[in-house]
Amino acid sequence: MKFHYVLLFLLHHHHRQQFFLFVSLVFSPLVRCGHHDYSDALSKSILFFEGQRSGVLPRDQRMKWREDSGLSDGRSIYSMDLTGGYFDAGDNVKFGFPMAFTTTMLAWSVIEFGELMPPSELRNALVAIRWGTDYLLKTVSQPNRIFVQVGDPYKDHNCWERPEDMDTARTVYAVDAPNPASEVAAETAAALAASSMAFRSVNPGYAQTLLRNSVRVFQYADNFRGAYSDNSNVRDGACPFYCDFSGYQDELLWGAAWLRRASQDNSYLNYIEINGKTLGADDNINEFGWDNKHAGLNVLVSKEALEGNMYSLQSYKVSADSFMCTLIPDSSSSHIDYTPGGLIYKPGGSNLQHATTISFLLLVYANYLDRTSQTVNCGNLIASPLSLRTIAKNQADYILGDNPMGLSYMVGYGNRFPQRIHHRGSSLPSVKDHPQFIACKEGSTYFNSTNPNPNVLVGAIVGGPGEDDVYDDDRADFRKSEPTTYINAPFVGVLAYFAGNPN
């Protein structure tokens, strides 16, 4: 990964063909946990989002150690209600860019795999999406303005404090036209458009609201092009945590692609056909995450290229094929690194975000190929949908415990999982157990403690082990021990697929 990613995570939060042989032969022996309960893992991966909630918690809140927080968000300068939404990770800041991406991925999980979810978990997933979209609608509720962040990250990270006690500056970061915020606005448009599809059959009125606002916020993104972190009033809050390192152009294509899929409006089809080259659709095609949308964009657009036999979209399918081939160790174009134990690995920290997003894309693309009876030609071998699913299953099983440590990297799943995650609310006593206020620096005692966290953040997937497959369960090592919403969101879809197709 590029150096800027390394820098980002150093600073953040302180914060087959013969191909099948590789599965069993190339990687070192693992601790096998036998059959995984994907349904249990699915329900826990969704429950995690309740532990990340900001705002007034509902009566049916299941993560009982959490209470209301951030109740004055937005009121200071703007007299706006910006309560709600999610804390991105183990701190108490609401960063709009990764929150929008998280919401997009939760919605995409439901769109592709919702029918495989038990009805109760589909309902929980929709609730998790709506906790995001209700907040995102607030951030774009004023004309020609988008609220991109709430909370001063430096003051927040200087404290080890429960969200319920939070007394650091709840600075509101906003961008007004004609100043640009293309990547946040376009990712918000993607989130709202994708979510409109997720809600269409259960709440058509809400789905319409989401799509209408998606169209409007995409216009802002496209009319005033540029990076949100280039605004002087935003840069110091967004950077280096969620600066846009890969450019805003990929988000414009991604937002347009989601609007095309949600609305079937030809103007968005024209946009992705005409702007693919100028906005760099062929660049950095082997990455996908909160900052870089290219691999996801190519898979998303390939659906229409494959099913509609659209020649004008073939370049996106070619890039998607190319990305899939990079993931296959026996392929002549393989260049993704795996740990000795078999985990997809990219340097920089929070590595499991790559394993979960890539696994999700493998499963989605396998479905698109299956429906059109296609395979991927990797030159020296042909990759079938089954071979793509096999790679995804190995990643999922590694995360759930089939790894050299014999450790589940999902908190609360399996018999052995991380006990000392880098997460303020989880590591400090709950308000129910310790109603007295715990001030900024008083929390340091709990941060420095070697005791397990008192509150189990069920379903949280941590940053994960290093390139040597080693994980130390150290609260201070945030690169490995901090969970994030965007690690979990795509894994909801992955687990839904395997819950429905365990074999």
Image (cartoon, rainbow, N blue to C red):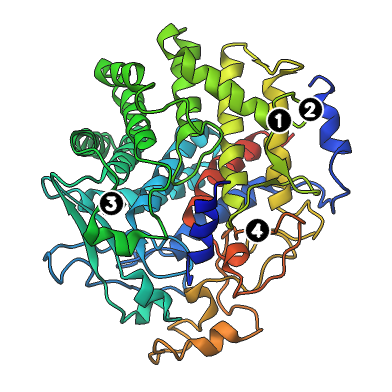
Q: Residue 230 carries which label?
A: 3
As measured in the structure, the alpha-carbon distance from the residue carrying label 2 to the one carrying label 3 is 42 Å
Callout 1: 10 Å neighbours few (<14), some, many (20+)? some
Tell us which disc is closer to us: 2 or 3: 3
Tell us which disc is closer to us: 4 or 3: 3
As measured in the structure, the alpha-carbon distance from the residue carrying label 1 to the one carrying label 2 is 7 Å
As measured in the structure, the alpha-carbon distance from the residue carrying label 3 to the one carrying label 1 is 35 Å
Q: Mark 4 points at which residue?
A: 464
Place residue 19 in its image quadrant: top right
Ranked by sequence position, the earlier of labels 3 and 1 is: 3
Q: Would you place residue 399 above or below residue 115 in this image?
A: below
Q: Name the residue under label 1.
A: 334
Residue type beneath disc 2: Asp
Q: Which mark is residue 330?
A: 2
**Residue at disc 1, secondary structure:** loop
Residue at 83% across / 33% down in the picture? 22
